[in-house]
Image (cartoon, rainbow, N blue to C red):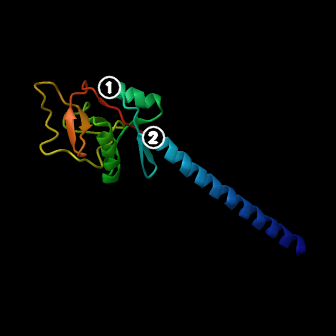
Amino acid sequence: GESGLAEVNALKQRVTILDGHLRRFQNAFSQYKKAVLFPDGQAVGEKIFKTTGAVKSYSDAEQLCREAKGQLASPRSEAENEAVTQMVRAQKKNAYLSMNDISTEGRFTYPTGEILVYSNWAKGEPNNSDEGQPENCVEIHPEGKWNDVPCSKQLLVICEF
């Protein structure tokens, strides 16, 4: 009867209020995300890529990202690779990617052990060739191409969140 109708109307009013709250929250979050990404960040889908401009060896780079509750950049698509490439260009430094072939030579995987779902190797790479020093880590160049490098090399750190 009438009390049921009153309850429905009260619920409709509550939904309208919650819709307004949600819209304001989404707008605020959008603004916050822009501020967080400025000036050294990129976002692709749910991923955010960020750098402090630090230059480190692979293990130190990995640790820096882990301590920040992220991981080294792991581009899994052309769009993600392009976002990281833009940061490399802006910083004017090649950067580490998370993938390596430390476990099995020639088999590059993500830190999880998962095989690559996307790659953008430069012509003739990976070639494991650096005057006898093994190249088990991956760097990304300003044109977005990848090269295998020794993990001791000092490169830009870009973390992914």
Horizontal and vertical percent for residue 75?
A: 33, 45
| Residue 120 visible in the snapshot | yes
Badge 2: few (under 14), some or many (20 or more) residues near its Cα, within 10 Å? Answer: some
Numbered mark located on residue 47 in the image? none
Left or right of residue 124, residue 49 in this image: right
Horizontal and vertical percent for residue 76?
A: 33, 48
Query: What amino acid type should be assigned to the residue bearing mark 2?
Result: Phe
**In contact (CB < 8 Å): disc 2 and disc 1:** no
Which residue is pictured at 68% across the width and 56% down the height?
21
Left or right of residue 102, residue 74 in this image: right
Badge 1: few (under 14), some or many (20 or more) residues near its Cα, within 10 Å? Answer: many
Numbered mark located on residue 161 in the image? 2
Left or right of residue 121, residue 98 in this image: right
Whichever of callouts 2 and 1 sits on the residue coming sooner in the sequence is 1
Horizontal and vertical percent for residue 12?
A: 76, 67
Which residue is pictured at 54% across the width and 51% down the height?
30
Q: Residue furthest right?
A: 2
The one of 48 and 86 positioned closer to us in this rendering: 86
* In the image, residue 132 above or below residue 22: above
Callout 1: SS = strand
Callout 2: SS = loop
Which residue is pictured at 15% across the width and 33% down the height?
128
Q: Residue furthest bottom?
A: 1
In which quadrant of the rendered view does residue 122 lie?
A: top left
Q: For mark 1, what is the residue?
A: 56
In which quadrant of the rendered view does residue 91 lie?
A: top left
Horizontal and vertical percent for residue 44?
A: 41, 50
The N terminus sits in image quarter: bottom right
Q: Nearer the viewer, mark 2 or mark 1?
A: 1
